[in-house]
Image: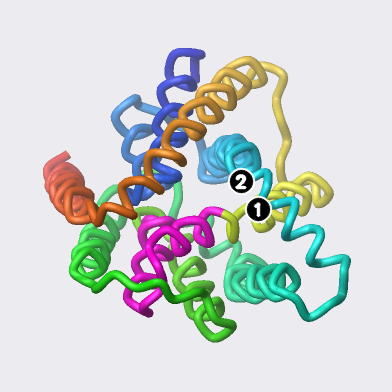
Amino acid sequence: MNIIEAIILGIIQGLTEFLPVSSSGHLELAKAILGDTSVPEESLTFTVVLHFATALSTLVIFRKEVGEILKGLFQFKWNEEFQFSLKIVISMIPAVIIGLFFEDQLESLFGGKILFVGFMLLVTALLLLLADRAKNTDKNVSFSNSLIVGISQAIAMLPGISRSGATISTSVLLGIDRTKAAKFSFLMVVPLIFGKIAKDILGGDINFQSSEMIPMSAGFVAAFVAGLLACQWMIALVKRSKLSYFSIYCAIVGSIAIVYSLVS
């Protein structure tokens, strides 16, 4: 992978991590178009690096909320901050279970499974269409909601299922305020990304080759900058109920991916 390809993939990751179109799905499609021949493990390593970049951009955008979450965790008082922190923890449980017990099966789905990505993009399109038609409310995220949204996040570990799209759509369909749903969606993934990276590094699963450091660094910076822009844009779009446009986009890209995989 050269620097230009890494930057392109970084921009794609930064934009699609927050926009409900599946960052992992678009990365797999882009790798196929660019002719990336990485084995699944190497492909997943680069994906993790890019996710780390967008996690940092989330911390920058939501630094106030992150500070409140950390404050709430260590206060041990049954106040609003502590309850929100606990909801974040609860939302992580399904994805942690999948990551611990089905990691090998999940890794096998990365690395050029274009047909699978195409069908999952169609699922994302359906979710977004349903959510866009849901009524606006001012409801907060409840403890039971956080678990259900967490299950959506776990399912969205599949390439082609948009994590933000699945979690925001699930939240909106549960009657949660759209802006609060978007913020909760973006914040709930940050601990998982950092936990995943720490686990892989400590376990020796991620081995950075010196020849790949420059391209990965370029991709990292591109993903971080694109993520800063996309995160703020997405919150505004969700608030204005514009998810149907992304539904159409996912349906088109998913259909193209399916046709491409069948004829190539």
Residue 177 drawn in magenta: yes
Secondary structure category for the residue under label 1: helix
Q: Which residues are magenta?
A: 162-186
Residue 2 x/y as whole percent? 49, 15
State the residue position of label 1.
65
- Badges 2 and 1: C-beta atoms under 8 Å apart? yes
Q: Is residue 113 visible in this depiction of the protein?
A: no
Callout 2, which amino acid? Answer: Phe
| CA–CA distance in space, label 2 to label 1 | 5 Å
Quarter of the image for residue 63 reads top right
Magenta segment's dominant SS is: helix
User: What quarter of the picture does the C terminus occupy?
Assistant: top left
Nearer to us in this view, 60 or 3: 60
Q: Residue at x 87, y 75 (%)?
A: 76
Any mark on residue 62, and which?
2
Count neighbours of disc 2 (C-alpha within 10 A) and say few if under 14, some if 14 to 19, many if 20 or more: some
Residue 231 x/y as whole percent? 46, 41
Q: Is residue 206 visible in this depiction of the protein?
A: yes
Callout 1, which amino acid? Answer: Glu
